[in-house]
Image (cartoon, helix red, strand yellow):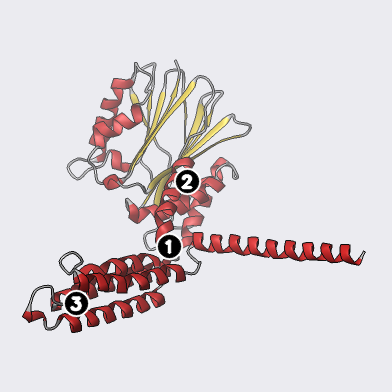
Amino acid sequence: MTRGAGAESLRARMHKRLHRTRIGMRKAGVDYFRGDGSDWVALAALLVAVPAIAGGTLWHPEWIAPTALVLPIIAGGLLLRPANLLALYAASAAALIVEAALFGPYDQGRDRITPGTVLVVAAVGLSGLLVAQFRSRVGVPWRRGGTMLFDLRERIRVQSTLPKLPKGWHHEMALRPAGGQSFSGDFVVASRTQGGNILEVVLTDVSGKGMDAASRALLLSGAFGGLLGSLPPHGFLTAANGYLLRQDWDEGFATSVHLVLDLESGDYELFSAGHLPGLQLSAGTGRWEEKTGEGPLLGVYDGAQFDPVKGTLRPGDVLMLFTDGLVEAADRDIAEGMDRLTGEAERYVHSGFAGAAWHLIEAVAKDVNDDRALLLITRDG
């Protein structure tokens, strides 16, 4: 019995040690993934690389130039924390001193350590230190920075995806950031509420453009997505306005349009917060009509009131919502831009506007240095 108890105790101790080891490895992996893990392995490897490069320079300076020391310095700027980076710089400086002492004065032959070599290594080192300090302040490791931005971009794209509509309805959506960037100050959030009978869509244009507005757009898209469907339609823009005011941003205003569409009857309400009017194409008359609600910009003052305009989408009708980057330019006013947009849209009436959103942006605002968004909702005839 004593022998069996001892064996069981040994197995229990081994199991606990294995469990602690597994937890420790998992924690270390998570810390490394987040950029909080130790960088001693990278530091050790780079400290070994410095004398190896210096030895290669002394052996064959024609193939391994003295400026090759910038290679571990660049890698250190991407991998190491600022404190450990200084240790790498000290090792690199010592290697330069040794090379200079063994090669002799720089004016007595080729492949010497010249003042220009020292300046190049020092400049690269300063740049690496600035990069390391920036990473330390932001808290995003270089190995995860690009992945994080990609993930944020995909989250914005998913949030801008409109829900599937019932038979008889069709939607088209296109977003084009300024300057060909991946992030836009324009965004869309949408949801089907009240058992799926009501489609609510919010198109927002954040002040600024491109990367300058992307961070605010990301925050607002998450907040607006949470508000949408959680509040009565008449209270959404009021709540959104209060949210922007609480942020206290220096450049914190935005324009927004909120569509509340009954998918059974086709009746809708269109709320506007300083946004451009929507355009409705009537299949009966073949004419475009402006539809705009009354309301100020979001984030300007408290107690704002937003009054909707009402309408109905009948079979064959089209409703088009867009941001100012699509119709506003320095060489024309907004009215002219809207006329051009509706003129181009006429070409897609007979095709049912399938794939029209992207092509309309290409046709009327391809090279505009502003964020552009276009939403089309059609009811089959």
Image x and y of residue 53, in percent: 27, 70
Residue type indicated by callout 3: Val
Which mark is nearer the camera, 3 or 2? 3
Q: Earlier in the sequence, mark 1 or mark 2?
A: 1
Q: Using the numbered discs, state the Cα–Cα distance from disc 3 to disc 2 in whole angstroms.
A: 46 Å
Which mark is nearer the camera, 1 or 2? 1
Residue type indicated by callout 1: Pro
Q: Are marks 1 and 2 in contact (CB under 8 Å)?
A: no
Identify whether 305 is placed above or below 99. above
Which mark is nearer the camera, 1 or 3? 3
Decide: few, some or many residues near mark 3? Use Cα within 10 Å; few <14, some 14-19, many ≥20: some
Residue topped by disc 1: 141
* Mark 1, secondary structure of its residue: loop
Image x and y of residue 378, in percent: 43, 24
Decide: few, some or many residues near mark 1? Use Cα within 10 Å; few <14, some 14-19, many ≥20: many
Number of numbered callouts drawn: 3
Q: Are marks 3 and 2 in contact (CB under 8 Å)?
A: no
Residue shown at the point (23%, 68%) measured from the top left: 68
Residue shown at the point (38%, 52%) measured from the top left: 214
Q: Which mark is residue 118?
A: 3
